[in-house]
Image: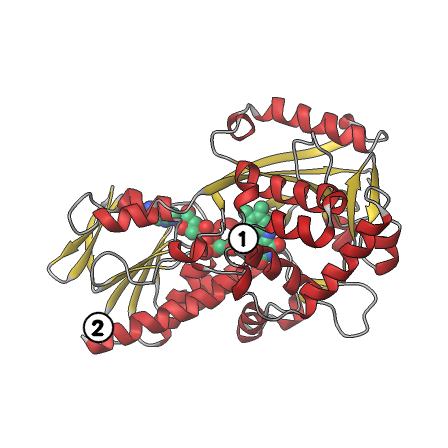
Amino acid sequence: MTNQSIAIIGGGLTGLVAALRLAEKGACVTVFEAGQKLGGLAASFQMQGEPMEKAYHHLFITDVEILDLIRELGMDDRLEWLESSLAIFRDGKAWPFMSPLDLLRFKPCSLAGRIRLGLVALHLKHRSRWEGLVKVSAINWMRRACGSSATKAVWEPLLNGKFSDSAESVSMAWLWARLHIRSNSREKGARREKLGYIRGGFIEIIKAMEARLKSLGVRIELNARIGSIEEANGRVAIHRDRGNELFDAALFTGSNRAFSRVLPDSELTVDYKTALAQVRYLGAICMVFETDQKLGDFYWVNVNEKDSPFLVMIRHTKLVPAERYGGKEIYYLGAYVPHEDRRFTLDTGELRDEWFTTLKGMHPEFETQRVSQFHCFRFRDAQHVVDCDYESKLLPYEGPFPGLYLANFAQIFPQDRGTNFAVREGNKVAQRIESALADR
Ligand SMILES: Cc1cc2nc3c(=O)[nH]c(=O)nc-3n(C[C@H](O)[C@H](O)[C@H](O)COP(=O)(O)OP(=O)(O)OC[C@H]3O[C@@H](n4cnc5c(N)ncnc54)[C@H](O)[C@@H]3O)c2cc1C
């Protein structure tokens, strides 16, 4: 691919992996990232001098694509498999939710509901075909399979928390993929699930990718928001505030909404923009705070209380040893919300007070004055709504005109987005671009 110039728009994992594969083939690659740093949704910040993900991140043992990348980057020794623990907070209490016995003791739903929950979990673990579930609403499927008591206690809060007012329309194929991956991510015979974490944080992968790209001569431009992309006599023109550049091909890796914004309104793009707009996105809010208090015994707590403003409480230091962070405990509170939801724009102090009040309701021992660090991150377009019609919304890598490509997590189906699939998509789209340029 020598002498082929390629622009990669977006310095998240999809863009970085595509850049790596194309640069390895000899292409002349430039990465344009709008933010100050690389990493996208997997980017980090500093907490106690240690890098922390802005949004909680871990890996499953089934995440083979990113595990291969970690090996390729020579980072195996940084990958740790740590014992996880999961609970559901419901009716004022955290109920362990890891073993069949836990399930039997889960009082928020009827005994019959608990038994049906267990049978459904087993069925989904072993069911390998998902195609018949695409057009079926996940909540309705669960109502039929588990009954209303279990669906009310487990699935409705989960789907409402993740997809807000779109919860009823979410496809069972999406839920199958989540549960299937999760239930198969235990080593055979292991009592507890283990989750992967990179010593030093996910930023280590991003840093290693950056170093590898630079060694291959890739140009990385930060604070480089691309304002528009146009067709230019068989090539692709990229415009940003610092001027225009022409490339033989360009790959966009931001959301469908972000892609639509940079495309011109023309005959060439009108239908394509309509297709992009079919995918609905939600934003995500992640509060991260540090305290010397231990709140509960679980890494991951799904908060299934009706009025909770957040969906999940994560005690990061239950997974990763607190000694790494000066002995302090680190927590995340997370929610997915429509961009127009008041929580997405509310003043951070007010939001913190509201969420901390809920947290104190869950853990009366929680003292806000013992919180020594606090950060709040809000991400636009952090989750797409995978509804029963989603297959018809999937777009190919090929964009609205030759030479322009799209690869983002809205093209992943039926699995949910994740760093593993970002790596897979980056690899696949790079191959597609390579063969298209070879055929020219
Ligand atoms: C709350 C939360 C928790 C998560 N937890 C996990 C987890 O535990 N495990 C896991 O594997 N994954 C997790 N993920 C998902 C994972 O972070 C993403 O799937 C992955 O990072 C997506 O990478 P990407 O490159 O496709 O997209 P992104 O990371 O979104 O990267 C796209 C990049 O494009 C840039 N961009 C957009 N428009 C422009 C423009 N016009 N010009 C220049 N640049 C532009 C953006 O700034 C961004 O950096 C989580 C995500 C969230 C939100």
Residue 301 is left or right of residue 260, and the answer is right
Q: Residues within 10 Å of mark 1 (few under 14, many from 20)?
A: many
Disc 2 target residue? 3
State the separation of the CA atoms marked 1 and 2.
44 Å
The spot of residue 73 in percent (x, y) is 53, 72
Q: Quadrant of the C terminus?
A: bottom left
Q: Secondary structure at mark 2?
A: loop
Q: Nearer the viewer, residue 1 or 187?
A: 187
Residue at image position (47%, 29%) is 340
Task: Kindly identify which residue carries mark 1.
Answer: 171
Percent x, y for residue 322?
78, 50
The structure residue drawn at horizontal position 58% and vertical position 26%, both measured from the top left corner, is 348
Q: Amino acid at mark 2?
A: Asn
Query: For the point 48% across and 65% down, which residue is it?
Result: 423
Judged left or right of residue 234, residue 377 is right
* Pick the front one: 48 or 72: 72
**Kind of residue sitting beneath label 1:** Ser
User: Does the residue tagged 1 have its C-beta within 8 Å of any atom of ligand 1?
Assistant: no
Q: How is the image coloured?
A: secondary structure
Q: Is residue 219 visible?
A: yes
Neighbour tally class for label 2: few under 14, some 14-19, many 20 plus, Cα within 10 Å: few
Examine the image and state in which quarter residue 162 appears.
top right
List x then y, in percent, for residue 208. 51, 64
